Amino acid sequence: MSDISTTKASAETMISMTGVAKWYGAFQALNDINVSVRKGEKIVLCGPSGSGKSTLIRCINHLEAYQQGEIRVGGILLGHQAKSIDAVRREVGMVFQQFNLFPHLTVLQNCMLAPMRALGLGKAEAEGRARQLLERVKIAEQAEKYPAQLSGGQQQRVAIARALCMRPQVMLFDEPTSALDPEMVKEVLDTMIDLAREGMTMICVTHEMGFARQVADRVIFMASGAIVEEAPPVEFFSNPKHERTRKFLGEILGH
């Protein structure tokens, strides 16, 4: 019998986090996290530095281990066994603050590597998929270059294409524009907006509130490792319920 537990819960639920808690020693980084994300839904996570946003999304693909509660991705129970972790990671793509591209590989090779190694694709099929996705993020002409020859915005778009080459069901973004110069932010956000319009299930940690207004189905505000408030963007920005949310929005939006 497989040790990967699955559930027949609603096929529309892509991610379910129930009572999730995490500690670093005596410090509790996540406290009773309950989140459900439907297929095709776009979630923006925001909050002050150290509020647990990045830890939360890193738990979804087990880059961080959680100690309490339950996480399911596409019906798969994310346990601590390698088999369930690998199964979930095949469904979840992730884009980080830093681009994490292999400097000794070309853009094309960066995109081909994981499908060949993890999915067993042949070279020709992996190359075809990589070129198609580089075209999708509007950077196909850079395929033979090395990461050091690209701008930060271009490197981040390569990182998005690389994640998409695994054909994930969910994309996680951990402050994908925070390491970029301001003039490069728009090109990455435009790529993410295109993905959202195509129906990709997305969870994005970001301080780009314009992106949240334009793309998010829900905005989740975190503080001190807990979810303080969640609401559709119109309600979240126009009528925040909690004082901590109002304070955060006042600081980040300048009013």
Image: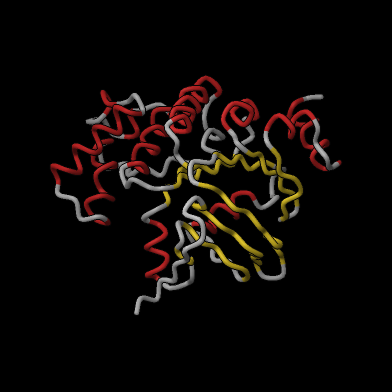
Residue 4, position as x, y percentages in the image: 40, 71
| Residue at position x 49%, y 61% in the image | 62
Q: Residue 240, position in %: x, y?
A: 80, 36
Here the colouring is secondary structure
Quick check: 218 left or right of 113?
right
Q: In terms of image quadrants, where is residue 81?
A: bottom left
Whole-percent x, y for residue 53 in the image: 63, 49
Residue lying at the far bottom in this picture: please name it.
Answer: 1
Q: Is residue 18 above or below residue 234?
A: below
User: Residue at 53% across / 34% down in the picture?
Assistant: 179
Who's the residue at 83% across and 40% down the image? Answer: 241
On screen, residue 211 versus residue 4, left or right, reads right
Q: Relative to 30, is 255 on the left or the right?
A: right
User: Outermost residue, right direction?
Assistant: 243
Q: How many marks?
A: 0
* Residue 55 position (above or below residue 110): below
Image x and y of residue 46, in percent: 67, 41
Residue 4 vertical placement versus 110 (above, below): below
**Quadrant where the image shows the N terminus:** bottom left
Q: Residue at x 35, y 41 (%)?
A: 164
Q: Quadrant for the C terminus, please.
A: top right
Quadrant position of residue 229:
top right
Which residue occupies the foreground of this view, 224 or 241? 241
